[in-house]
Image: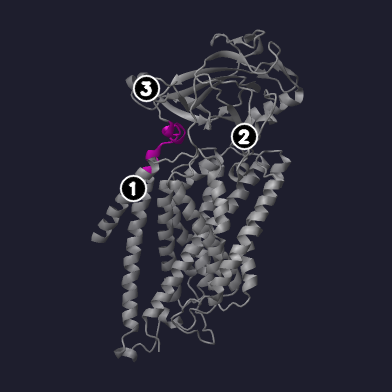
Amino acid sequence: FSFLQERLRYILVLLLLLHSTVSFYVPGVAPINFHRNDPVEIKAVKLTSSRTQLPYEYYSLPFCQPSKITYKAENLGEVLRGDRIVNTPFQVSMNMEKKCEVLCNVPNKPVTLTVEQSKLIAERIREDYYVHLIADNLPVATRLEFYSNREEEEKKKEKDVQFEHGYRLGFMDGNKFYLHNHLSFILYYHREDVEESQEHTYRVVRFEVVPQSIKLEDLKADEKSMCTLPEATGSAPQEIDPTKENQLLFTYSVHWEESDIKWASRWDTYLTMSDVQIHWFSIINSVVVVFFLSGILSMIIIRTLRKDIANYNKEDDIEDTMEESGWKLVHGDVFRPPQYPMILSSLLGSGIQLFCMIRIVIFVAMLGMLSPSSRGALMTTACFLFMFMGVFGGFFAGRLYRTLKGHRWKKGAFCTATLYPGVVFGICFVLNCFIWGKHSSGAVPFPTMVALLCMWFGISLPLVYLGYYFGFRKQPYDNPVRTNQIPRQIPEQRWYMNKFVGILMAGILPFGAMFIELFFIFSAIWENQFYYLFGFLFLVFIILVVSCSQISIVMVYFQLCAEDYRWWWRTFLVSGGSAFYVLIYAVFYFVNKLDIVEFIPSLLYFGYTALMVLSFWLLTGTIGFYAAYMFVRKIYAAVKID
């Protein structure tokens, strides 16, 4: 009990530290100070839909365009996410109100949409597309107000407010399509403290929009591009008929409000979109359950092992134990090299590469350095880190390959550098061809693909070779017992020692520890949410490492007790058992949470899910393998072998 109390105390301290880490925030960019009447540029990012999973660039639809279109230079992460940041014709000035203004250059003259353009807009509205704009790097959000299940009196007083990313392109009523052609921008500013003689400076701290659909006849425009909005009750929405040409006006209004929110806290609105309490309870529950179970497992296995080792080392009753049994019996075969040692060491090398990359990314993100305000930074960092971690992957793979009596180190290094990245690149290339066919901005441009290939063969491959060379030259791992020349016969195994049963049993605990976090990660990837709870994620990662290691040790112990010494591949496969549950969860999420019906979005979902499952299997399999290998070397070093 004192052991468990100690662990619980440790967990609470860690959670308190994490809470302070979650609230800590290092902004991705320096603040911009505006003076009154300074231009605040509104840029467009992309159009997204959780129904199709295909982002499109802003001007793929016939929106009003500025005289000169300029695209922002983007980092690798932004390109891979499908962002295409471009300027828009919205004229917004700091702290200057605009009642209603026509957007396109020619005043009084409505925009005429051709039949093709009308069809395209109607299709995008049917597919539930959202438009994403940014002002001073802040994404636009739509305010949603609703009553929570409180008492009747309280209902009248208080509404719950949540924010939705971007704004809906339009809406459907029956079989009719309506376009949001008027945008009411509400921008919040924070007035900075300055000396009396100086002019006041302002910082943008929130960017909201109220989209409206207003019929052309109800928007009265004059020669100066000004317009008057109709009364809210009497206006009809702007219908888009996909079978004919449509005439409409694109208009907008700007309203400024002062806010107490400081610039450093301006992202809080976007990051508190879901209930964090669920998170806290689930994480604490996972931590307590996993540490409790791991405590019990450790106690059982340590007690059993001590008993085993004491029995094996008793020199007096050698006569009594003439008939050996259990794991000592296979001492002459336990370190016999497995089949396909090159592939095993290559996969483990890629697993080490992934492990190092994920550990560093989560830790840096936990410190706030990869916050959502620095767009694409997370993905860019992950790509570069994976390339540079090749040196560690190569080193561990080379040393293990030498231990497993391998000789062709150059071929082994090439296999390590190309096996897993080659599968990832192949799947991504095939999916990219489908996205290209749909003319989506989510398609990786050809120059970016060439750049990624250059990074792979110019950075990752040489580093893997370098690591492999030094790993292969280093002393192989020291195995405490010699391997017999003739392999012993393996007795018939019970049904529960089957590989697939082992995968099912071993995957439950690690998956149970992280499946709540998985829900938030899936929501971030597939439903365009922001994911920022890296403090929690770091804790979940620690739990995952602990639970994978312990389950792997238990499984290899049972296997050796059953006198089956073929543990190398089996441990790697069984330790990655939680990846099987991740796959099942992904199918469940697809069926229950997403509204995807078309072939290409479904293909994208399952293609990227397959990559996630493969990467997760490599990661957990590698963690479990190294834990089991250390355990096996420890226990055989502790017994006296004649």
User: Which dot marks residue 548?
Assistant: none
Verify whether residue 67 appears in magenta: no
For marks 1 and 2, give the one nearer the viewer. Answer: 2
**The N terminus: image quadrant:** bottom left
Q: Which residues are magenta?
A: 263-280
Residue at disc 3, secondary structure: loop
User: Callout 1, which amino acid?
Assistant: Leu
Residue 280 at x, y = what percent?
A: 37, 43
Residue at disc 1, secondary structure: helix
For marks 3 and 2, give the one nearer the viewer. Answer: 2
C-beta proximity under 8 Å, tags 3 and 1: no
Residue at disc 2, secondary structure: loop
Q: Disc 3 marks which residue? A: 158
The colour scheme of the drawn protein is: one colour
State whether the magenta stretch is mostly helix, strand or loop.
Answer: helix
Q: Residue furthest bottom?
A: 319
For marks 3 and 1, give the one nearer the viewer. Answer: 1
How far is the residue under mark 3 from the one under mark 2? 38 Å
Q: Looking at the image, can residue 271 be seen? A: yes
User: Callout 3, which amino acid?
Assistant: Glu
User: Which dot marks residue 85?
Assistant: 2
Q: Is residue 277 left or right of residue 526?
A: left
**The C terminus: image quadrant:** bottom left
Q: Is residue 140 left or right of residue 65?
A: left
User: Callout 2, which amino acid?
Assistant: Ile
Q: Disc 1 marks which residue? A: 17
* Dot 2 alpha-carbon crowd within 10 angstroms: few under 14, some 14 to 19, many 20 or more: many
